[in-house]
Amino acid sequence: MLALSGWLSALYALPRSFVVALGVVNLAYGAFSFLLARRDQRPLALIRALAAANVAWGAACGVLAVVLAGTASPFGLAHLVGEGLFVGALGALEWRWRERLRAT
């Protein structure tokens, strides 16, 4: 998203700074998830934090889609709704299986 932020901004009909912010959030999430996944033992507190953050981000994407419905293109709205559904569902699964995710 960061590398294509100018093109995505035009496609999504959203400000480039907004697309960059989405990219930064996704990059931070990916780095945290990767570091957590690489651990042999994962602290329950970090798994809970990851699950809660994913559910919160899913809800935030839904709110952003509603707020930006009059501005964003169908592609931009599809991205927000799709990401919100995916990340929210992932967070719910992480919460459900949090005990099993503690160890490899």
Image: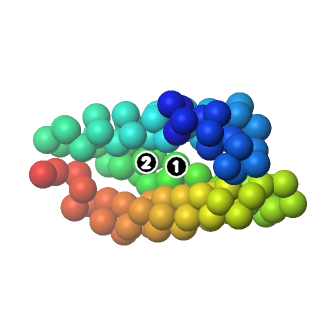
Whether pointer 1 and pointer 2 mark residues with C-beta atoms closer than 8 Å, the reply is: yes
Task: Give coordinates of residue 80: x percent, y percent.
Answer: 63, 58
Q: Which colour assignment does the render follow?
A: rainbow
Say which amino acid is labelled 1. Answer: Ala
- Image-based side of 9 in relation to 72, left or right: left
Give the camera-side residue of 53 and 9: 9
> Which residue is at a point 42% across and 62% down the rendered structure image?
90
Q: Where in the figure is residue 99, as x and y percent of width and height? A: 26, 60
Question: Label 1 crowding class (10 Å Cα cut-off): few <14, some 14-19, many 20+?
Answer: some
The amino acid marked with disc number 2 is: Leu
- Label 2 sits on a secondary structure element that is helix
Give left or right: position of 33 versus 28: left
Residue 10 appears in view: yes
Q: Residue at x 32, y 59 (%)?
A: 98
Q: Nearer the viewer, residue 70 or 84?
A: 70
Compared across the picture, whether 94 is left or right of 57 comes to left
Secondary element type, mark 1: helix
Image disc number at residue 53: 1
Number of the label disc, if any, that sits on residue 97: none
Mark 2 nearby-residue class (10 Å; few <14, some 14–19, many ≥20): many
